[in-house]
Image (spheres, rainbow, N blue to C red):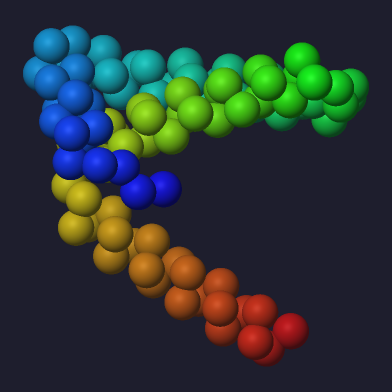
C-alpha cells in the first residue's frame, strides 16, 4: 500500500512522540486484533464483521508502515521484492 509523504510525516511524528518500543508493542497488539477479526468474520460473515475486519486491517497497515519506517524502508523493500519474485516463480512453475 502506498502512503503519501504527508502520511509518512505523521507516522514519523507518532514514532517520535510515543517511541520505538511503544509503537512496536502497538504493532503486536494490532496484529492480534486483526487475527481475531479474521476469525470472527470467517465464523459469521456479515456487514459488522466485515467492517471490523476492514478497520483492523487498516490499523495493521498503519502500524506496519511505522515498523517499516523504524527498520528502514530500503531493507524491507528489498526483501518484499525478493519474496514477490520467488512467489512469481512458484506460480509460473505450478
Q: Between 12 and 46, which is closer to the camera in this rendering?
A: 46
> Residue 92, percent across and down?
65, 87
Quadrant placement of the C terminus: bottom right
Image-quadrant location for residue 51: top right
> Residue 37, percent across and down?
69, 21
Q: Is residue 72 above or below residue 87?
A: above
Q: Is residue 88 above or below residue 20?
A: below
Query: On the picture, is 20 further left or further right than 88?
Result: left
Query: On the picture, is 78 further left or further right than 27?
Result: left
> Residue 21, percent across and down?
23, 18
Q: Is residue 15 visible?
A: no
Q: How many marks?
A: 0
Image-quadrant location for residue 57: top right
Instruction: State the residue at coordinates (66%, 79%).
Output: 91
> Residue 77, percent across and down?
29, 59
Instruction: State the residue at coordinates (28%, 65%).
Output: 78
Q: Is residue 94 above or below residue 4?
A: below
Image-quadrant location for residue 53: top right
Instruction: State the residue at coordinates (39%, 71%).
Output: 82
Most extreme residue toward the right, as rendered?
44
Most extreme residue toward the bottom, as rendered?
93
Q: Is residue 23 visible?
A: yes
Amino acid at each position: 500500500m502506498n502512503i503519501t509523504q504527508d502520511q509518512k510525516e505523521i507516522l514519523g511524528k507518532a514514532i517520535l512522540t510515543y517511541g520505538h518500543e511503544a509503537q512496536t508493542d502497538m504493532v503486536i497488539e494490532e496484529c492480534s486484533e486483526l487475527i481475531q477479526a479474521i476469525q470472527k468474520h470467517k465464523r459469521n460473515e456479515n456487514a459488522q464483521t466485515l467492517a471490523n475486519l476492514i478497520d483492523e486491517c487498516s490499523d495493521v497497515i498503519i502500524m506496519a508502515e511505522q515498523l517499516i519506517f523504524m527498520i528502514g524502508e530500503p531493507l524491507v523493500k528489498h526483501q518484499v521484492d525478493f519474496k514477490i519474485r520467488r512467489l512469481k516463480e512458484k506460480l509460473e512453475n505450478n
